Amino acid sequence: MSARVTAAEVARAAGVSRSAVSRTFTPGSSVSTSTRNRIEAVAARLGYRPNALARTLITRRSRIIGVVMAAIDNPFHAQLLQCLDAALQARGLAMLLRGAARPEMTDELIHHLLSYQVDGVIVASGLFSSSAAKACVGVATPVVMLDRLMRAAGASAVGSDNRAGARMAAEHLVALGRRRIAFMSGTPGISTSSERAHGFLDGLAEAGLAPIAIASGRYEYAAGQGAAEALLAHAPDAIFCENDLMAMAVLDVARARGVRVPDDLAVIGFDDIPAAALPAYALTTVAQDARAMADAAAALLEERIEKPARRASRRLIACTLVRRRSA
Amino acid sequence: MSARVTAAEVARAAGVSRSAVSRTFTPGSSVSTSTRNRIEAVAARLGYRPNALARTLITRRSRIIGVVMAAIDNPFHAQLLQCLDAALQARGLAMLLRGAARPEMTDELIHHLLSYQVDGVIVASGLFSSSAAKACVGVATPVVMLDRLMRAAGASAVGSDNRAGARMAAEHLVALGRRRIAFMSGTPGISTSSERAHGFLDGLAEAGLAPIAIASGRYEYAAGQGAAEALLAHAPDAIFCENDLMAMAVLDVARARGVRVPDDLAVIGFDDIPAAALPAYALTTVAQDARAMADAAAALLEERIEKPARRASRRLIACTLVRRRSA
């Protein structure tokens, strides 16, 4: 073990500044290749290893951000996680990740993350109770909710402008001349789902329309198949789905029944996951900007870490309609 | 701030053992609901917050595992990450995650993870140089490579039995009577790719066959489309692809050209990502067992953390052929 070699000793032996040593061991920091090579060689020779945890005890900053995320294998969540990783790395922050197998676990996971003295917490696509919010406020740890805009005391929030996005989908279907429009909702009780529902119903109402049928597909492909069967029984000429996985289920069920898309049935999804662009689906969808969402969450959190007195705030990221063949 | 309240004080006030307090704040630990509720109420009243980092300085164990993963938004990687999260949580270990935007970053990211005094590192689907391996050996931090079996001094490794899996694909195509068999490889220089290539070529050779054409699709859908065009120019009656994304590209290109699957062309992929089961693809594929891989990686790492003298070892996880409509 050689934990006692200090950065100052490495700097002296390499003939560089203390700051150059620090930058060499901070990913994303700027340092020339030749300087980096020299410092790494000296550090290896002396057995130097930077100790981020010891630094934590001095600065009271761990530079670690706790992230709670539900359903990592949902394609949109995986995109969001990838963007979040990039946004945090760009700020020199590390990510302590906990997946929430069940949304009810979110509180427990946040408590556990807090025990690692994280500088802040991002709750991505999970549920968040007021007791968890209180725990964060009690220890003065800033929290940002990503992709869920539940009201929780003291938590900042970043999400897509789901309402405007879903309204765009309604307006597009109306403009295409569709009148027998059905609606597949996501998971009841989740903010994104009710926001999209409101936006879509508003958009239809403006044209004097209402959905001819509504069913929930719980944001999943398999549940979406059942909901698609239920909706197709009403012979709609369009279906808007609150996410792409459910819209893909609609396309597959329609194909199996010989319903022609988009002639007989127009279909619009939400998210723009990579599979939406596959030729077998070519799904028209409301795209969420995962990169902008992740960047905004990291920036909001960093701001609140730097300026703890600042109040919680919200940021809405615009969606765009991506037109493919399904509508 | 109330960071000075100790677990012993909480235990005294709640009339429970110190260990019950500790278990209450360790996710996955066993403690009765009534005891947990009593302890949480007392902890909230006293303002107690467990400090995992302070514990680290005493025990020299952080209970944090560093994970480096490339391309988190690759569907198989997202599955693997989800299973890894579950496997680590089940062992009371936290995950410090770093995505590697480029494989060459892996070394730098490992160095950075080491600065957080992680107990061990899992390198999942990244590249791993011998200098990074040396850094881990130098600080006595065990490393497990997941889904990459590169030879690196001191690193344990867990991977699918890619060779046997790809051989199964060859045997299945031969048994179906296919003789004009083409092969789409993944990324050159990556161990999984060369293992699958060896297994597939061995399986064909046993039947006295060799591929009529070979092209690389770099494990991606878009590159797979170009490679599919190149292979279809040789009029094969079967194509084996080293992952599912490339096989889906083959199916889409074949569909666009009017090539009938599986009558004119049998297609087999590798991974069994969720999209492989979609009716639009119904892809026959060699399934990797992401859960078993993640469990084995966590178990191997824990074993080496507990018994540092133990030598690095390897574990191969069996694959299975999942038969759907494409072959």
Image (tube, coloured by chain):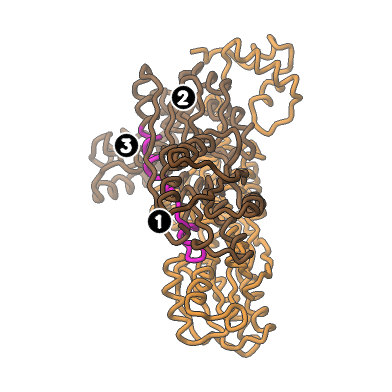
Chain colours: A orange, B brown
Please state which of the two labelled residues, at mark 1 or mark 2, is closer to the viewer.
Answer: 1
Chain letter of the residue carrying label 2: B
Q: Quadrant of residue A242?
A: bottom right
Report crowding for label 3: few under 14, some 14 to 19, many 20 or more residues within 10 A (C-alpha).
some
Residue B311 image-quadrant placement: top left
Q: Chain of mark 3?
A: B
For marks 1 and 2, give the CA distance: 35 Å
Of labels 1 and 3, earlier in sequence is: 3
The percent coordinates of residue B241 (x first, y second) are 53, 48
| Other-residue count near label 1 (Cα within 10 Å), few / some / many at <14 / 14–19 / ≥20 | some
The residue labelled by disc 3 is B22
Query: Above or below — where is A167 with respect to A78?
Result: below
Q: Is residue B4 left or right of residue B29?
A: right
Mark 2 residue element? loop
Depth check, front residue: B324 or A301 = B324
Q: Hey, which quadrant is residue A197 in on the image?
A: bottom right
Q: Amino acid at mark 2?
A: Ala
Mark 1–mark 3 distance (CA, rounded to whole Å): 48 Å
**In the image, what residue occupies the spot 29% across and 50% down?**
B37
Q: Nearer the viewer, mark 2 or mark 3?
A: 2
Q: Which residue is mark 1?
A: B323
* Front-most of residues B190 and B307: B190
**Comparing labels 1 and 3, the label whose residue is closer to the camera:** 1
Q: Are marks 1 and 3 on the same chain?
A: yes
Looking at numbered disc 3 in the image, what kind of residue is underneath it?
Answer: Ser
Alpha carbon distance from label 2 to label 3:
32 Å
Q: Secondary structure at mark 1?
A: loop
Where residue A10 sits: x, y (%)?
A: 65, 13
Camera-side residue of B255 and B175 = B175
Region in magenta:
B275-299
To which residue does mark 2 refer?
B155
Check whether the beta carbons of the residues at disc 2 and disc 3 lie within 8 A of each other. no
